[in-house]
Image (cartoon, rainbow, N blue to C red):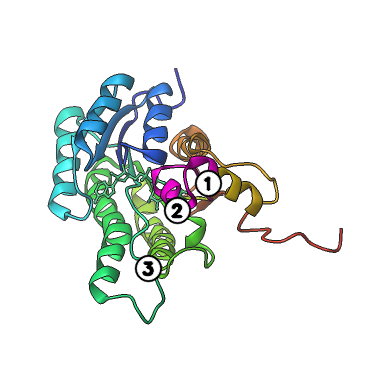
Amino acid sequence: MTQLEGLVTIITGAASGLGEATARRFVRDGATVIMSDIQQKKGEAISSEIGAEFLAADVTEEKQIADLVDQALARHGRLDCMINNAGALGVVGGIATISSEDWNKTVSLLLGSVFYGMKHAARAMINQGDGCILSTTSVAGLVAMGPHAYTAAKHGVVGLTKSVASELARYGVRVNAVAPGTVPTDMTGQIYGGQEGVRETSKARNPLGRSVEAADIAGGFAYLAGPDGKNITGQILTIDAGQSACPAPNRYY
Ligand SMILES: NC(=O)c1ccc[n+]([C@@H]2O[C@H](COP(=O)([O-])OP(=O)(O)OC[C@H]3O[C@@H](n4cnc5c(N)ncnc54)[C@H](O)[C@@H]3O)[C@@H](O)[C@H]2O)c1
């Protein structure tokens, strides 16, 4: 038996970065993985390479997330784990310059999508009497570290995780999130001039002086979804090499 043997798992934003690494890790650990993304070709290519399934869905459209969950149930009869991971940086700029339209789009992508994922996964998991809902927040969900709308939405994911964990515990459904530091992916590569630029920035920002990799984040999801996570709910697992807890060297030692 492997750690995640038979665990029917949906991962959104799985065609790239953290979602892709998590899909690879879950398949390796024995899970039945349904990868989802708006990048259909890329998602299908990865899923057939690793032995996962792929279903296209736009996480900003509630009906598409409802259908995604229904298709997983039709194929496998249950949903054990839902990972709400899809996202992008969204609108940047000073608070006095951000348009309402751009604000709403970003919050819809980063927080509305997590609401849809939790809502439709909960529908299946309450009936089952167990399940695990995981989401990707960020160190920007804990401290002021990103663009305004991104930071606000990721803080929202933290709040929603705790709130929904408190409701669903009575049904045996656990709800947690992972808060990654700065990890080289397509999203961050665009900000820091490629993936090596991300690694250098990340090392300079955290006290361990190491780059945090997508596989580290995948390991966090696997821990929370697997047997060692069975008594964990309402928690945010920060994987950032100490970046958010120890932002500057302390002069007392
Ligand atoms: N990379 C980091 O340093 C970092 C740190 C903290 C949090 N995060 C979060 O991790 C998550 C994944 O980001 P990543 O770094 O792997 O970036 P990425 O760009 O490599 O992957 C994001 C994926 O989400 C998909 N996506 C975007 N909009 C979508 C939509 N509307 N519907 C469905 N899929 C959509 C993209 O197609 C892409 O495959 C995001 O929520 C991001 O905010 C990343």
Query: Is label 1's Cβ within 8 Å of ligand 1?
Result: yes
Q: Residue at x 39, y 52 (%)?
A: 169
Q: Is the Cβ of the residue at disc 3 closer than 8 Å to that at disc 1?
A: no
Mark 3, other Cα within 10 Å: few <14 / some 14–19 / many ≥20: many
Task: Return the disc, 3 or 1, that comes first in the chain's sequence.
Answer: 3
Q: Which residue is mark 3?
A: 149
Q: Is residue 242 visible?
A: no
How far is the residue under mark 2 from the one under mark 1?
A: 8 Å
Task: Return the disc, 2 or 1, that comes first in the chain's sequence.
Answer: 2
Q: Residue at x 48, y 33 (%)?
A: 227
Q: Residue at x 36, y 26 (%)?
A: 31
Q: Which mark is residue 198?
A: 1
Q: Is the Cβ of the residue at disc 2 closer than 8 Å to that at disc 1?
A: yes
Instruction: Single out the mark in the foreground, 3 or 1.
Output: 1
Q: Quadrant of the C terminus?
A: bottom right
Query: What secondary structure is found at the residue carrying circle 3?
Result: helix
- x and y, in percent, of residue 213 in the image: 53, 38
Does the segment drawn in magenta span residue 183?
yes
Q: Residue at x 33, y 21 (%)?
A: 50
Mark 1, other Cα within 10 Å: few <14 / some 14–19 / many ≥20: many
Residue stretch in magenta: 181-196
For badge 2, the amino acid type reads Ile
